[in-house]
Image (cartoon, grey):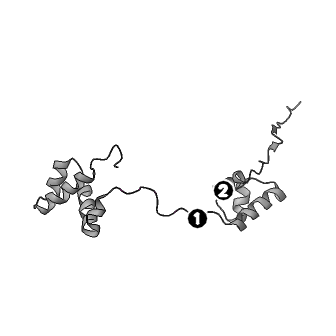
Amino acid sequence: MSHRNARTTFQGRLLIVARHREGWPQAHIAKAMGVSRKCVKTWLDRYAAEGEAGLHDRSSRPHTVSRRTSAEVERRIIELRRRQWRGPDWIGAELGVPTRTVSRVLARHRVPRPDDHGGVRLRALPRR
């Protein structure tokens, strides 16, 4: 099933191929179908490579997922936080890891922030 904003369905893609076989220029097919020339070329290329199966809907999910931080690096991040009680900027610079990665690892392992004291935030007393 096509997503609700798709300009073409499987039948529309078959029509693109049929019109191309009849000798229509890609630009004319695009104008008649209300899509871009790039869209027409994409479906023609898929049809040439895969046949009719290439015209069916595909998942838009990525083929790969970015790498997760290794267990060893996570262990070192947590160890540094507990030993030095420093923030993600310092830990990241110390280990050569992006600050955001350090923040995510600490959040994933529920390591408290340096300014968190049992759920109670402390603030400085006013100067006199």
| Residue 61: in magenta span | yes
Q: Is residue 50 above or below residue 34?
A: below
| Place of residue 2 in the rendered image (x, y in percent of width and height, measured from the top left) | 34, 49
User: In which image quadrant can residue 48 be found?
Assistant: bottom left
| Residue 119: in magenta span | no
The mark lying in front, picked from 1 and 2, is 1
Amino acid type at mark 2: Thr
> What secondary structure is the magenta-colored segment mainly?
loop
Label 2 Cα neighbours within 10 Å, binned few <14 / some 14-19 / many ≥20: some
Q: Is residue 89 above or below residue 126?
A: below
- Magenta segment: 57-68
User: In which image quadrant can residue 115 be found?
Assistant: top right
| Place of residue 57 in the rendered image (x, y in percent of width and height, measured from the top left) | 34, 55
Seen at 27% across and 47% down, the residue is 7
Horizontally, is 16 left or right of 124 in the view? left
Q: Nearer the viewer, residue 94 or 72?
A: 72
| Place of residue 25 in the rendered image (x, y in percent of width and height, measured from the top left) | 13, 59
Q: Is residue 7 above or below residue 84?
A: above
Seen at 65% across and 63% down, the residue is 69
Amino acid type at mark 1: Arg
What residue would you read off at disc 2? 99
| Place of residue 110 in the rendered image (x, y in percent of width and height, measured from the top left) | 74, 50
Quick one: SS at disc 1?
loop
Determine which of the numbered discs, if any, sits on residue 67 in the image.
1
Question: Disc 1 versus disc 2: distance between alpha carbons?
Answer: 16 Å
